Amino acid sequence: MSFVGNFVRATIGLMKGLGITGKNFLRTVALRQAMTITEKWGSRKIADRYRGIVALTTDLQTGKENCVGCMACMRVCPGHCIYIEVERREGHHGRYPVKFFVDLSLCSFCGLCVEVCPTPSLIHSHVWQFGGYSRSQLLLGKGQLLNWGDEEQTRRGDAELITGKRSQQRRAKKTDDKQAE
Ligand code: SF4
Ligand code: SF4
């Protein structure tokens, strides 16, 4: 194509791009039609399979925390963002996590901690609207993680999925299968 032809095509492309930029500029600045979805306009619907910030669950039947303090999540985390301190506690299966922190500023949402957890203690929540102005605000404590876990358990509404140890669930399933034979 000739120089003139290329010049015309490039100018048309440039004008189209500038037109879109100008239109959105007017919408956001002059007409105040913000492009960001905030709580004011309601939240975006999140897909069921969405894997948001990790959260801690409790046994819905007993109300006890599901974490047995095995430290597997802390060891497997590639970002070293999990910190746990445990102790033996009467009535708690395994070791009780006295402290459980997740540093969100380091988390890559890889999901390895959830995969490796032998109990259904760590799950991905649907929380995605969370931020802070300093790194310390992104350090999530146990209270926060349990709150989000409660919300996620309520949202899923599937007690079986996140109640009790997975090994117990597997044993129960085997027994059911045997009885069915
Ligand atoms: S999702 Fe990945 S990076 Fe985030 S806490 Fe779990 S293992 Fe660590
Ligand atoms: S892997 Fe699961 S049970 Fe083990 S310490 Fe982490 S959250 Fe608790």
Image: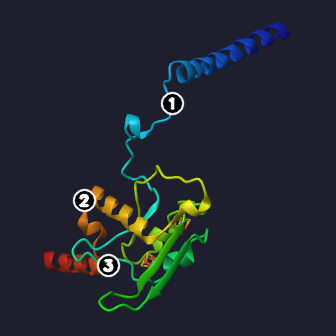
Q: Nearer the viewer, residue 52 or 117?
A: 52
Asked whether the residues under the numbered discs 1 and 3 touch, taking CB atoms below 8 Å apart as contact, a structural biologist would say no
Residue 103's x, y, as percent?
Answer: 56, 66
Residue type, mark 1 in image: Met
Which residue does the image show at 54% across and 24% down from the upper left? 28
Q: What's the distance in space between the residues labelled 1 and 3, CA to CA?
A: 44 Å
Tell me the SS state at disc 3: loop
SS assignment at label 2: loop
In-image side of 106 versus 4 (left or right): left
Chain-order first, disc 1 or disc 3:
1
Q: Nearer the viewer, mark 1 or mark 2?
A: 1
Looking at the rendered image, the quarter that the C terminus falls into is bottom left
Residue 110 percent coordinates (x, y) = 54, 62
Look at the numbered discs 3 and 2 and tell me whether their residues touch, using CB distance below 8 Å: no
Q: Secondary structure at mark 1?
A: loop
Q: Which residue is mark 3?
A: 165
Q: Residue at x 38, y 47 (%)?
A: 47
Residue 42 percent location from the top left of the image = 37, 38
Of the 4 image quadrants, the one containing the N terminus is top right
Q: State the residue at coordinates (45%, 56%).
A: 52
